[in-house]
Image (cartoon, rainbow, N blue to C red):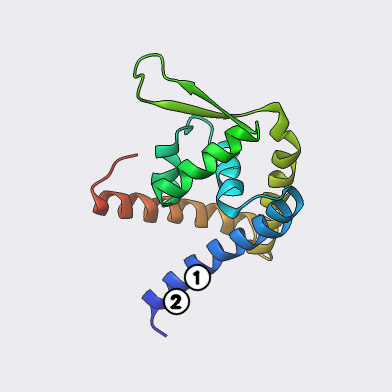
Amino acid sequence: MNRITDYLTGIRRISKLHESMLKEYVCQEYGMTLTEATVISFLYNNPGKDTAADIVELRMMQKGNVSQAVETLVQKNLVKRRQDAEDRRKIHLSLTEESEAIVRTVEEVNRRFQATVFDGIAQEEMETFSAINLRIMQNAQRALGRKE
């Protein structure tokens, strides 16, 4: 395989691993869809990024799937909506107290995921990886013409 294929395959495998861990530990335990678990995980892991549009953009998910998952989570009282004070069209999402057990499981998934993906990698290598990864993301974002 060539480097581009290796790189893209690696990114997809890492994403698939995270999805499979969410399915195994969150979806099965709490009777949720992967999209619902992803919304909860996103809201927990990304303070300040709290709209459905943020989830759609940053997780590259379909708008309709995110909207449906948010509606289900609101009905289950795991997520609540709050209208933006300045822009009434903007709706902020937040986790409720009822989601605390799920959030604890998401934290455990995050720990297991990181331990698995970064197994055998020294702290210095992690710091180098983080710096390079940030530059790669910035380059890709700039090339796509978006700003974060």
Q: Are marks 2 and 1 in contact (CB under 8 Å)?
A: yes
Which residue is at 61% across, 34% downward? Answer: 75
Q: Amino acid at mark 1?
A: Gly
Q: Is residue 45 visible?
A: no
Q: Nearer the viewer, residue 124 or 133?
A: 133
Q: Residue at x 53, y 44 (%)?
A: 69
Tell me: residue 19, above or below residue 131. Answer: below
Image quadrant containing the C terminus: top left
Q: Is residue 141 left or right of residue 80?
A: left
Numbered mark located on residue 10 in the image: 1
Q: Amino acid at mark 2?
A: Asp
User: Which disc number belongs to residue 6?
Assistant: 2
Question: Which secondary structure, mark 1?
Answer: helix
Residue 107 place in picture, x, y as percent: 70, 44
- Please, is residue 1 above or below residue 77 in the view? below
In the picture, the disc for residue 31 is none
Query: Residue 99: x and y, percent?
Result: 69, 35
Q: Nearer the viewer, residue 10 or 129?
A: 10
Where does residue 36 sit, x and y in percent of width and height?
58, 46
Q: Secondary structure beneath disc 2?
A: helix
